[in-house]
Image (tube, coloured by chain):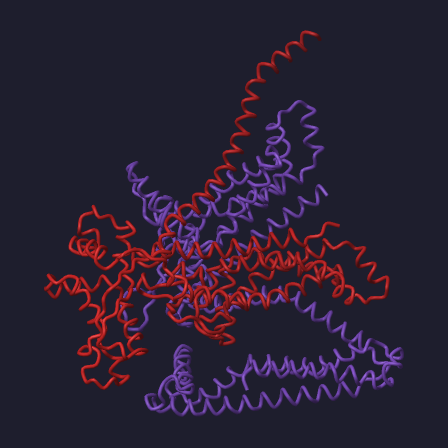
Amino acid sequence: MSKSVTETRALVEKTLRRRYWAERRFRAYGLVAVLLGILFVFFLFGSIISRGYTAFEQANLTLDIFYDPAVIDPDGQRSPDALASANYNTLVRNALRELFPDVQERADLRALSQMVSTSAAHELQARVRAHPELIGHHEKRRFLAAADVDQLLKGKIDRRQPEESRGISDRQIAWIDHLQQKAGLRLYFNSGFLTKGDSREPEQAGVLGAVVGSAYTLLVTLLLSFPIGVAAAVYLEEFAPRNRWTDLIEVNINNLAAVPSIVFGLLGLAMFLNFFGLPRSAPLVGGLVLTLLTLPTIIIASRAALKSVPPSIREAALGIGASKLQMVAHHVLPLAMPGMLTGAIIGMARALGETAPLLMIGMVAFIVDIPKGINDPATALPVQIYLWADSPERAFLERTSAAIIVLLAFLIVMNAGAVILRRRFERRW
Amino acid sequence: MPYAVLFLLIAALAIVGYWVGKYRALAVVGGGKGIRQLHSLPSYYGLLTALWAALPCVLVLIVWGAFQETLVTSIVKRHLPAGQLTTAAGQVGLFMNDVRNVASGAVPRDTASQPVQAAADDYRQLQTIAATARTGLVLALGVVGLWLARRRITATLRARNAVESLGEKALLFCSLIAIFVTVGIVLSVLYESILFFKAVAPHKFLFGLSWSPQTAMRADQVGSSGSFGAVPLFLGTAMISGIALLVAVPIGLYSAIYLSEYAGPRFRSWAKPLLEILAGIPTVVYGFFAALTMGPALRSLGESMGLQVASESALAAGLAMGIMIIPFVSSLADDMITAVPQSLRDGAYALGATRSETIKQVVLRAALPGIVGGVLLAASRAIGETMIVVMAAGLAANMTANPLEAVTTVTVQIVTLLTGDQEFDSPKTLAAFALGLVLFVVTLTLNFIALYIVRKYREQYE
């Protein structure tokens, strides 16, 4: 007997070291897994921010523009048509020529004027039409530089690369160096990125159109999904009898929450666009589709909020003679409202990041104008990111990352709002 | 009158109705003194009157709005040149587009063809008639409803009960929307899929080995007859989802175990939200990350090891997707592990087991059904994920088992088939709906099984 105990002891002690090792190893695996996950978060944010922050600055150069009457208005009539149709590129080219008197070849001149963004001519046109009295005078104005110049200044194009693979010639690099000294070519804060719509030219493209499109879409979503979601939650939590129908509704809601978002896009395409004939690419349809998508989230969150209101409140209200609807409307809903709003914000944050269903209903069009209503063709912020990520131009890469930064900033603000709302108003009973 | 103005008018009518009803109720009982003779509070009489005035108007307006365009279109269609009546639905759509453009003045009238001009005049006239009729009908309905409701008001009218039963019905209707959505999804996807299966046999679609959806646009075009064998897509989807699960399940499970069993409350309180950030990042961001960071990195890594890695490899998309679903797996597994009763752990400790032995041999085994359910949910999410694969996986339908090559998935094909130009009669476009049907059925089945397992498991310990 005693022998077997000592034997067992010896056996246990022999394996104990191994078992403790296994214990430590297991624990280390767990820690590594957690740290790996956190590392991914930082890596993701780091790679996006490091790629994208440069897009908030943009290369501009200042040119001394001579509003040459011979170019703008040879007739001297100052007629609006003549002012509108004049060749303002010539003004830019002349200004550049003065900086580089030794450039004579046509091809070289063209390459030279390509270093200023095409927006310069439009700006000059607008300026002259607003102030025709400028004609015949000189003025120093700041213009966007072309995307390649911008990328070189930011170091995104390597000067040491061979000329062919660089996309910008040695000659142009020499000019850029010259412009940096003579025309104040340098990086300025890029306000255009936040105040302009999309463009084919990277240096002129901005996110405002997409942000406004997203805002309209979310507005429609919020106005529809919040009342409907709350009403559905109230019914299921406060009124529904326990029977097979209620079970069916519940199973349905849980399943809808896990249906791939692209399937909602198919529904939107077949139902809203083809059957009801609503306009393509419109925030209205986007909002409708996202409503269906966020409804389960909002219903589930609202039910949880209703559940957290203690039954004593209900009993007290019923006890003093309130009807059931009065009890809900006057007592339960106000108490559950912070929780419901938190759920709504989280649902909206999800809707803001949703891309696939919007692709299905045609919100992928290239749209320059900033939408003015829920029926205007529009795109949304994540769709804009998708479109820019597909663009071959190198300069769109940093724009895409910058648009992602804008999107993430909105998401962080929304989620922080939800957290604050919860901390502030959540009551523990 | 535009819809927005009409809705405002109806709202105004409802407000008028509210006050009319309220004062009528008070007048019936002879002012404030007689208020105790009323069955309900005066405001309920007001609400009832407002509902009688506004509700029929809104319902009529919604139905009208849904069918006006279809009706007008079907009338205007008779202007279509005789030969084209029989042609495909796409032609009719083009014709109606022209008509609408001319009618709205977006296209100058004299540039359009003769039938389009006639149709546009007709269209504009019908629209005017419809708008006038709509306004007249709605306003008449509102006024009549208000008047009727006012006439019905007596001291014994059970106004509160009427308003509340209507309110409850409205709540019920809102909760039924979830069912309508499911039915809507099934019907719309099924309808287009049936059209597709008329052109392509279901077994050729489900078991065919070659996918090239380019069909000939014209009858005389050669080549590209289109083949719709979806097996390569299914395999591609399975491979990318498999890679994602290989990444997400171990990392998610181990971090759930560490966070729920080992970590102190302080570590847990900041590590868990940080991990869950991964779930809040939009998928388009992962797609960008996979396409522009992960893809090139894997490529150069492969080159340094002498491997040929496609720039849109399944591996890059799978890895990014795996990172995305880590928090999904970990929070579900966390729930399941914390649901295991403490008594089971205490029993194992009492037998001399170490912590890891307890976890491996008791806790995980007890939580296994729940964890399997969670993994199934994660798998269904991976299968339905769209943006990551659209941006980072390829378009060519390769049948390969090599994760370093480019494959395509069901969702990628749905997006490529449905963005850009589409005609709704070609099998190419309809194929997207058939793929959508498969996707819907598969994810629904997975969810159903997973939710069933999870619910069963929860009941076990409650």
**Count of labels in the image:** 0
Give how far across and how far down residue A5 sits, in percent.
68, 11
Q: Percent x, y for residue B145?
A: 71, 86
Q: In the figure, the purple chain has which letter?
A: B
Q: Is residue A362 left or right of residue B31?
A: left
Residue B365 appears in the picture as rendered: yes
Residue projecting furthest to the top: A3
- The relative height of residue B14 versus residue A145 in the rendered view (above or below) is below
Q: Is residue A93 left or right of residue B98?
A: left
Residue B207 is at least partly visible in this image: no
Please give the letter of the chain rendered in red.
A
Quadrant of the rendered structure where residue A238 is?
Answer: bottom right
Residue drawn 64% across the image and 88% down it: B139
The quadrant of the image that shows the C terminus of chain B is top right
Q: Quadrant of the N terminus of chain B?
A: bottom right
Residue beneath the point at 28% across and 56% down: A186
Q: Quadrant of residue A126?
A: bottom left
x and y percent of residue B394 in the render? 36, 53
